[in-house]
Amino acid sequence: MSLKRLLNQGKLRNHKTSKEEIINLLKITERDISDAKVEGISSDRKFAIAYNAILQLATIPLYCKGYETQGIGHHFTVFQAMKEIMGRDHYDLADYFDSCRAKRNITDYMHTGEISDKEAKELIKEAERFFKIVVNWFEIHYPNLLGDKGF
């Protein structure tokens, strides 16, 4: 779905990002990936924490393009915008993340014990991989926002 269409539907609004905002999102992501690996936490929570890391990462390209989400369904909107911004090579990944969103909703709002250890570990690995993808994308397309801080 095009960004213009999402904007016209009221799912996006204009947003001016900053170096500090992007760096903070990357730091949140690093924290969440680390926290998702903590032993003794349920698979449900590990999955939810890894999902949050992914959501923050997927938000970075949206902010860089000059938008932020608004209204109901903002997680879904982030993954739809991710397809438009990052391109066809990332469609399957965005769809996978959206399926994780639906699964996270079940475990956060309806039932416990829905997430296996294998699913949690898989999502943590995907979060780590996506971190590298987004940082690389960011460094190529928006190096001016990274400045001298690097990441």
Image (spheres, rainbow, N blue to C red):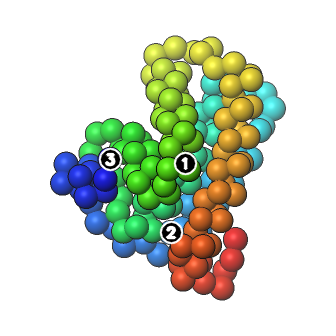
Indicate which disc residue 90 carries.
Answer: 1
Residue holding disc 2: 21
Mark 3 surroundings: few (<14), some (14-19) or many (≥20) residues within 10 A: few
Q: What is the distance, in whole Å, between disc 3 and disc 1 at their CAs?
A: 14 Å
In the rendered structure, which amino acid carries the disc numbered 3? Met
Q: Is residue 49 left or right of residue 1?
A: right
Q: Considering the numbered disc 1 on the image, is that residue within a helix, a strand or a loop?
A: helix
Question: Which residue is at a point 69% across and 77% down the rendered structure image?
Answer: 150
Residue holding disc 3: 1
Question: Which residue is at a point 36% across and 68% down the rendered structure image?
Answer: 66
Residue 116: horizontal and vertical position, in percent?
69, 18
Question: Which residue is at a point 37% across and 73% down the rendered structure image?
Answer: 16
Residues at discs 1 and 2 in contact (Cβ within 8 Å):
no
- Counting residues from the start of the chain, the first of labels 3 and 2 encountered is 3
Q: Is residue 96 above or below residue 84?
A: above
Indicate which disc residue 7 carries.
Answer: none
Q: Is residue 47 left or right of residue 19?
A: right
Single out the residue that lies furthest toward the bottom: 148
